[in-house]
Image (cartoon, grey):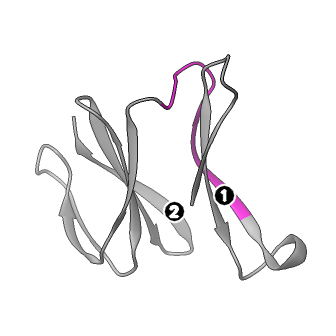
Amino acid sequence: MLLVPDSNTTPGYKLVVADTDVGVNGFSFDVLDHNDSQSSAGMVISKVRPGKYSDFERTESVVIKFDSINVEWIEAAAMLYYWDDHRFRTLQTSD
C-alpha cells in the first residue's frame, strides 16, 4: 500500500495497492482512492487485522478474512478498504 501525493505545491493524492499475482512484471496495481483537490495532510493509513467491523451508524457489518487498510482523516472520517470476492470493497467506519 502506498500513498502518493501529487507534489509539494498542488493538492491531491492517490492511495495505491500492489498485488503480486498478475500484471506487468508480476505486479498489478489498484487505485483505492484519489482526490485531485484535497491534500493528504491529516490522513493516517494503518493495517487492520481480520475480524468483524461495523459502519459508523452500526447498520452494516462485515467479517473480513485478510489484513485490510484503514484510512482516517483526522477529526473527519475513516474508511476501511478490504478484499472480498476478488475485489476491494469499502466500509465507512467513522464520520
Q: Position of residue 73 (x, y in %)?
A: 34, 35
Q: Residues within 10 Å of mark 1 (few under 14, many from 20)?
A: some
Residue at the spot 66% in from the left edge and 57% down from the top edge: 30
Q: Residue furthest front?
A: 8
| Residue 80 sits above or below residue 38 on the image | below
Q: Which mark is residue 88?
A: 2
Q: Quadrant of residue 2?
A: bottom right
Q: Look at the image and tell me in which quarter the N terminus lies.
A: bottom right
Residue at the spot 16% in from the left edge and 45% down from the top edge: 56
Q: Nearer the viewer, residue 67 or 91?
A: 67
Q: Residues within 10 Å of mark 2 (few under 14, many from 20)?
A: some
Question: What residue type is disc 2 on?
Answer: Phe
Position of 55 with respect to 82 (left or right) is left
Residue at the spot 38% in from the left edge and 45% down from the top edge: 44
Pointer 1: what residue?
Answer: 30
Q: Which residues are magenta?
A: 29-40
Q: Which mark is residue 95?
A: none
Mark 2 or mark 1: whose residue is earlier in sequence: 1
Residue at the spot 50% in from the left edge and 32% down from the top edge: 40
